[in-house]
Amino acid sequence: MANPKEHLKDLTKKHSFFEDVWDVARQIPKGRVTSYGAIANYLGTKMSARMVGWAMGACVNVKPKVPAHRVVNRVGLLSGKMHFGLPDEMQKRLEKEKIKVENDKVVDFEKLFWDPAKELVL
């Protein structure tokens, strides 16, 4: 049998915080948005919203794809838009899902907000 410590190390690598964030983001329904903080809160790391943002910025080539465009800041601002290449790409992706954006902010953010803590079972 392989060394148990090595096996645990392999499991830890496969189950990273970024992967947890991406798994939650993949569950955001089309036409809805959530926030970095809501994902952090769901994962039990309420003070890690910034790390959730880093995970969103790092998901460009991740498979299966991560709908990072559906993750915005706590008031609905497209604060991660610089990670989409073109300045308006995040907005275009949201608008393709019938989410209206004005001045880099999701219109009716409160109505479109998807809270993983209420929608997903741990």
Image (cartoon, rainbow, N blue to C red):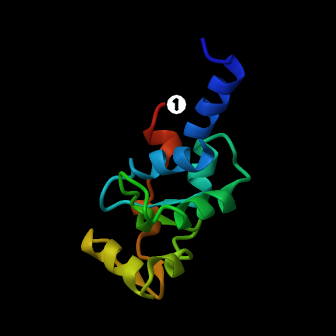
* Residue 52: x %, y % from top left: 61, 57
Image quadrant where residue 96 sits? bottom left
From what the image shows, is residue 121 above or below residue 64?
Answer: above
From what the image shows, is residue 33 above or below residue 99?
Answer: above
Label 1: element kind: loop
Q: Nearer the viewer, residue 53 or 13?
A: 13
* Residue 74: x %, y % from top left: 59, 65
Crowd rating for badge 1 (residues with CA inside 10 Å; few <14, some 14–19, many 20+)? few
Q: Residue at x 48, y 79 (%)?
A: 105
From what the image shows, is residue 1 above or below residue 31?
Answer: above
* Left or right: 24, with 96 as reference point: right
Quadrant in the picture for the N terminus: top right
* Left or right: 73, with 61 as reference point: right
Q: Nearer the viewer, residue 78 or 9?
A: 9
The residue that label 1 is drawn on is: 122
Q: Nearer the viewer, residue 14 or 38?
A: 14
Q: Residue at x 60, y 64 (%)?
A: 53
From what the image shows, is residue 11 above or below residue 2?
Answer: below
Image quadrant where residue 16 sits? top right
Q: Residue at x 68, y 18 (%)?
A: 3
Q: Nearer the viewer, residue 99 or 48?
A: 48
Q: Residue at x 51, y 76 (%)?
A: 83
